[in-house]
Image (spheres, rainbow, N blue to C red):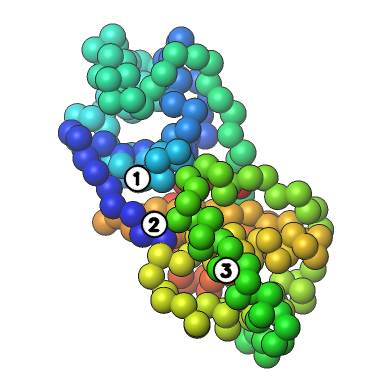
Amino acid sequence: MTGHATSPDGLHVHSSKRGSLHPGWRLRADLRVCRIGTRFVFLDLLKSRYFLLEGPAAGRFASFRDGQANEEDTDWLQEKHIVEPGLPVTHRPLPSSPTGSIFDTALPRARPLLIAEALREQTVAYRLVRREPIAALLTAPTASSFDLESCRAVAAACRAAARYRSAADQCLPNAYAMRQMLGRRGIAANIIIGVMLPFAAHCWLQAGDIVLSDPFGGIQNFHPLVAA
């Protein structure tokens, strides 16, 4: 999953776990933010774009996040459309840090019928990602169970199907498609979007502390930004 960080005075957001911001103001409801060092990476879920705050701009947001912003800080953040009037919104909590991946051991041979299903789901997901904002894709999972062997079979099929497509910018549709397949089998999984600096973004599927869509090494350096 790629994206470019734009920086009006160093602006960019990730999802905040904090609920107490400056009284009367909150982080915009459709923004998510994470802190990496002294900088903040943001994701605008409605515009499907990332942005970065660093330097004095990051200092303004840090003061706001800690409830210490002055009027000048709040006015600046409002002007940049980062904060809005209202009470803080509680977002879905980020999952536990992953400890492993189903790719840690060899996956089973992909079954042709599952590959065909994965190709159909990936095609639908790719079109959806191109047409809809990220916010429309981050719905809460409706399933509730977990079956490791079913996950391994679906992962093998999704990995095989993905070889028929360009690898560029496919992580979100691939994760979405895999979750659709798992949900059809009653298996719950979360879509996670993570970021790192220098800027890169990636999306993966996770159940509990197990990564389902990627080898562990492919996601371990990303800071989770949003989960659904």
> How many marks are shown on the rendered structure?
3
Label 1 packing within 10 angstroms: few (<14), some (14-19), many (20+)? many
Left or right, 149 with respect to 172, comes to right
* Residue type highlighted by circle 3: Gln
Q: Residue at x 38, y 70 (%)?
A: 168
Q: Secondary structure at mark 3?
A: helix
Q: Residue at x 74, y 60 (%)?
A: 183
Q: Residue at x 58, y 83 (%)?
A: 160
- Residue at which label 2 appears: 201
- Residue at which label 3 appears: 122
Answer yes or no: do the residues labelled 1 and 2 have beta carbons within 8 Å? Answer: yes
Q: Secondary structure at mark 2?
A: strand
Please, which residue is most extreme toward the bottom here?
Answer: 109
Label 2 packing within 10 angstroms: few (<14), some (14-19), many (20+)? many
* Residue type highlighted by circle 1: Tyr
Between 96 and 83, the one lying in front of the other is 83
- First in sequence: mark 1 vs mark 3: 1
Q: Please provide percent x and percent y for residue 13.
A: 37, 38
Label 3 packing within 10 angstroms: few (<14), some (14-19), many (20+)? many
Q: Please provide percent x and percent y for residue 107.
A: 65, 84
- First in sequence: mark 3 vs mark 2: 3
- First in sequence: mark 1 vs mark 2: 1
Q: Residue at x 26, y 36 (%)?
A: 11
- Quarter assignment of residue 157: bottom right
- Residue at which label 1 appears: 50
Vertical comparison of 208 with 101: above or below: above
* Residue type highlighted by circle 2: Ala
